[in-house]
Image (spheres, helix red, strand yellow):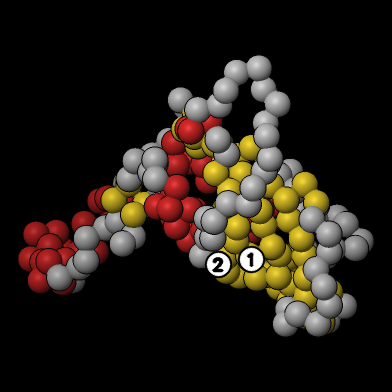
């Protein structure tokens, strides 16, 4: 029914589908190629580059989906940007395991920051979060082991809060969702 109406409108306008396609062919030819889906990188540097590129949107979607709209007091953040990853590991000491860990089982340490904006009582607050992320590569792909985060104001006037375990927080959940999507082949390579 709708197709017939569209066809009638085009005929009234003196156009056919083939003439529209012919007219727009030069425009279509000059379009950049669409980004391609990529396999989840095994290299930690490439993985974190892609993850931190996408992390603000993943975090914001998690925050919005977990908000309760009937709350009297509603303060939440928007993640604006994530920094590049710092991959220089801190010494962790000895693991107390019955079997020696292989190199692939050692957690990879990723340090990054996020800049966030929060709205409350007509004011804008800017926060910087400092994240210490532990990832391990398993047979089923990269997994989040744990994450610690600390919050400070931006620009920094006071010392940040002490680190807290934050893998259940918005950024930790966003990392886990991104890793799941990466393993599913849903990540686009925009480079």
- Tell which of 62 and 95 is nearer to you: 95
* Real-space Cα separation, disc 1 to disc 2, in angstroms: 6 Å
User: Which residue is found at the position 83% from the left and 59% from the top?
Assistant: 162
Tell me the quarter of the image containing the C terminus.
bottom left
**Closest to the observer: 115 or 72?**
115
Label annotation for residue 40: none
Evaluate whether residue 115 shows in this view.
yes
Furthest residue to the top? 98
Question: What's the mark number on residue 114?
Answer: 1
Q: Nearer the viewer, residue 120 or 182?
A: 182
Tell me the SS state at disc 2.
loop
Crowdedness near tag 1: few (<14), some (14–19) or many (≥20) residues, C-alpha within 10 Å: many
Up/down of 138 relative to 37, above or below:
above
Quarter of the image where one finds residue 88: bottom right
Q: Which residue shows up at 67% across the image and 31% down it? A: 95
Horizontal relation, residue 55 to residue 67: left or right:
left
The image quarter containing residue 79 is bottom right
**Is 163 displayed left or right of 53 in the figure?**
right
For image coordinates 72% across by 82% down, the residue present is: 155
Please, which residue is most extreme toward the right here? Answer: 72
Residue where numbered disc 2 is placed:
83
89 horizontally vs 139: left or right = right
In the rendering, at what x and y percent does residue 105 appear?
Answer: 53, 31
Q: Position of residue 65 (x, y in %)?
A: 68, 50
Q: Earlier in the sequence, mark 1 or mark 2?
A: 2
Residue at 39%, 45% (x, y): give it: 43
Q: Are marks 1 and 2 in contact (CB under 8 Å)?
A: yes
> Dot 2 surroundings within 10 Å: few (below 14), some, or many (20 or more)?
some
**Residue 12 visible in the current orientation:** no
């Amino acid at each position: 029914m709708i197709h017939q109406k569209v066809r009638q409108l085009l005929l009234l306008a003196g156009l056919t589908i083939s003439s529209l396609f012919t007219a727009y062919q030069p425009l279509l030819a000059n379009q950049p190629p669409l980004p391609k889906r990529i396999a989840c990188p095994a290299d930690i540097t490439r993985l974190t580059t892609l993850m931190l590129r996408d992390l603000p949107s993943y975090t914001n979607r998690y925050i919005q989906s977990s908000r309760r709209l009937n709350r009297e007091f509603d303060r939440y953040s928007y993640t604006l940007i994530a920094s590049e990853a710092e991959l220089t590991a801190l010494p962790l000491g000895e693991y107390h395991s019955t079997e020696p860990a292989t190199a692939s089982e050692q957690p990879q340490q990723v340090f990054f920051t996020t800049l966030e904006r929060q709205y409350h009582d007509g004011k804008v607050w800017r926060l910087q979060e400092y994240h210490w992320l532990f990832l391990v590569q398993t047979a089923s792909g990269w997994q989040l082991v744990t994450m610690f985060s600390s919050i400070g104001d931006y620009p920094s006037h006071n010392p940040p809060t002490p680190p807290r375990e934050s893998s259940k927080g918005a950024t930790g959940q966003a990392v886990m969702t991104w890793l799941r999507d990466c393993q599913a082949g849903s990540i686009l390579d925009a480079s």
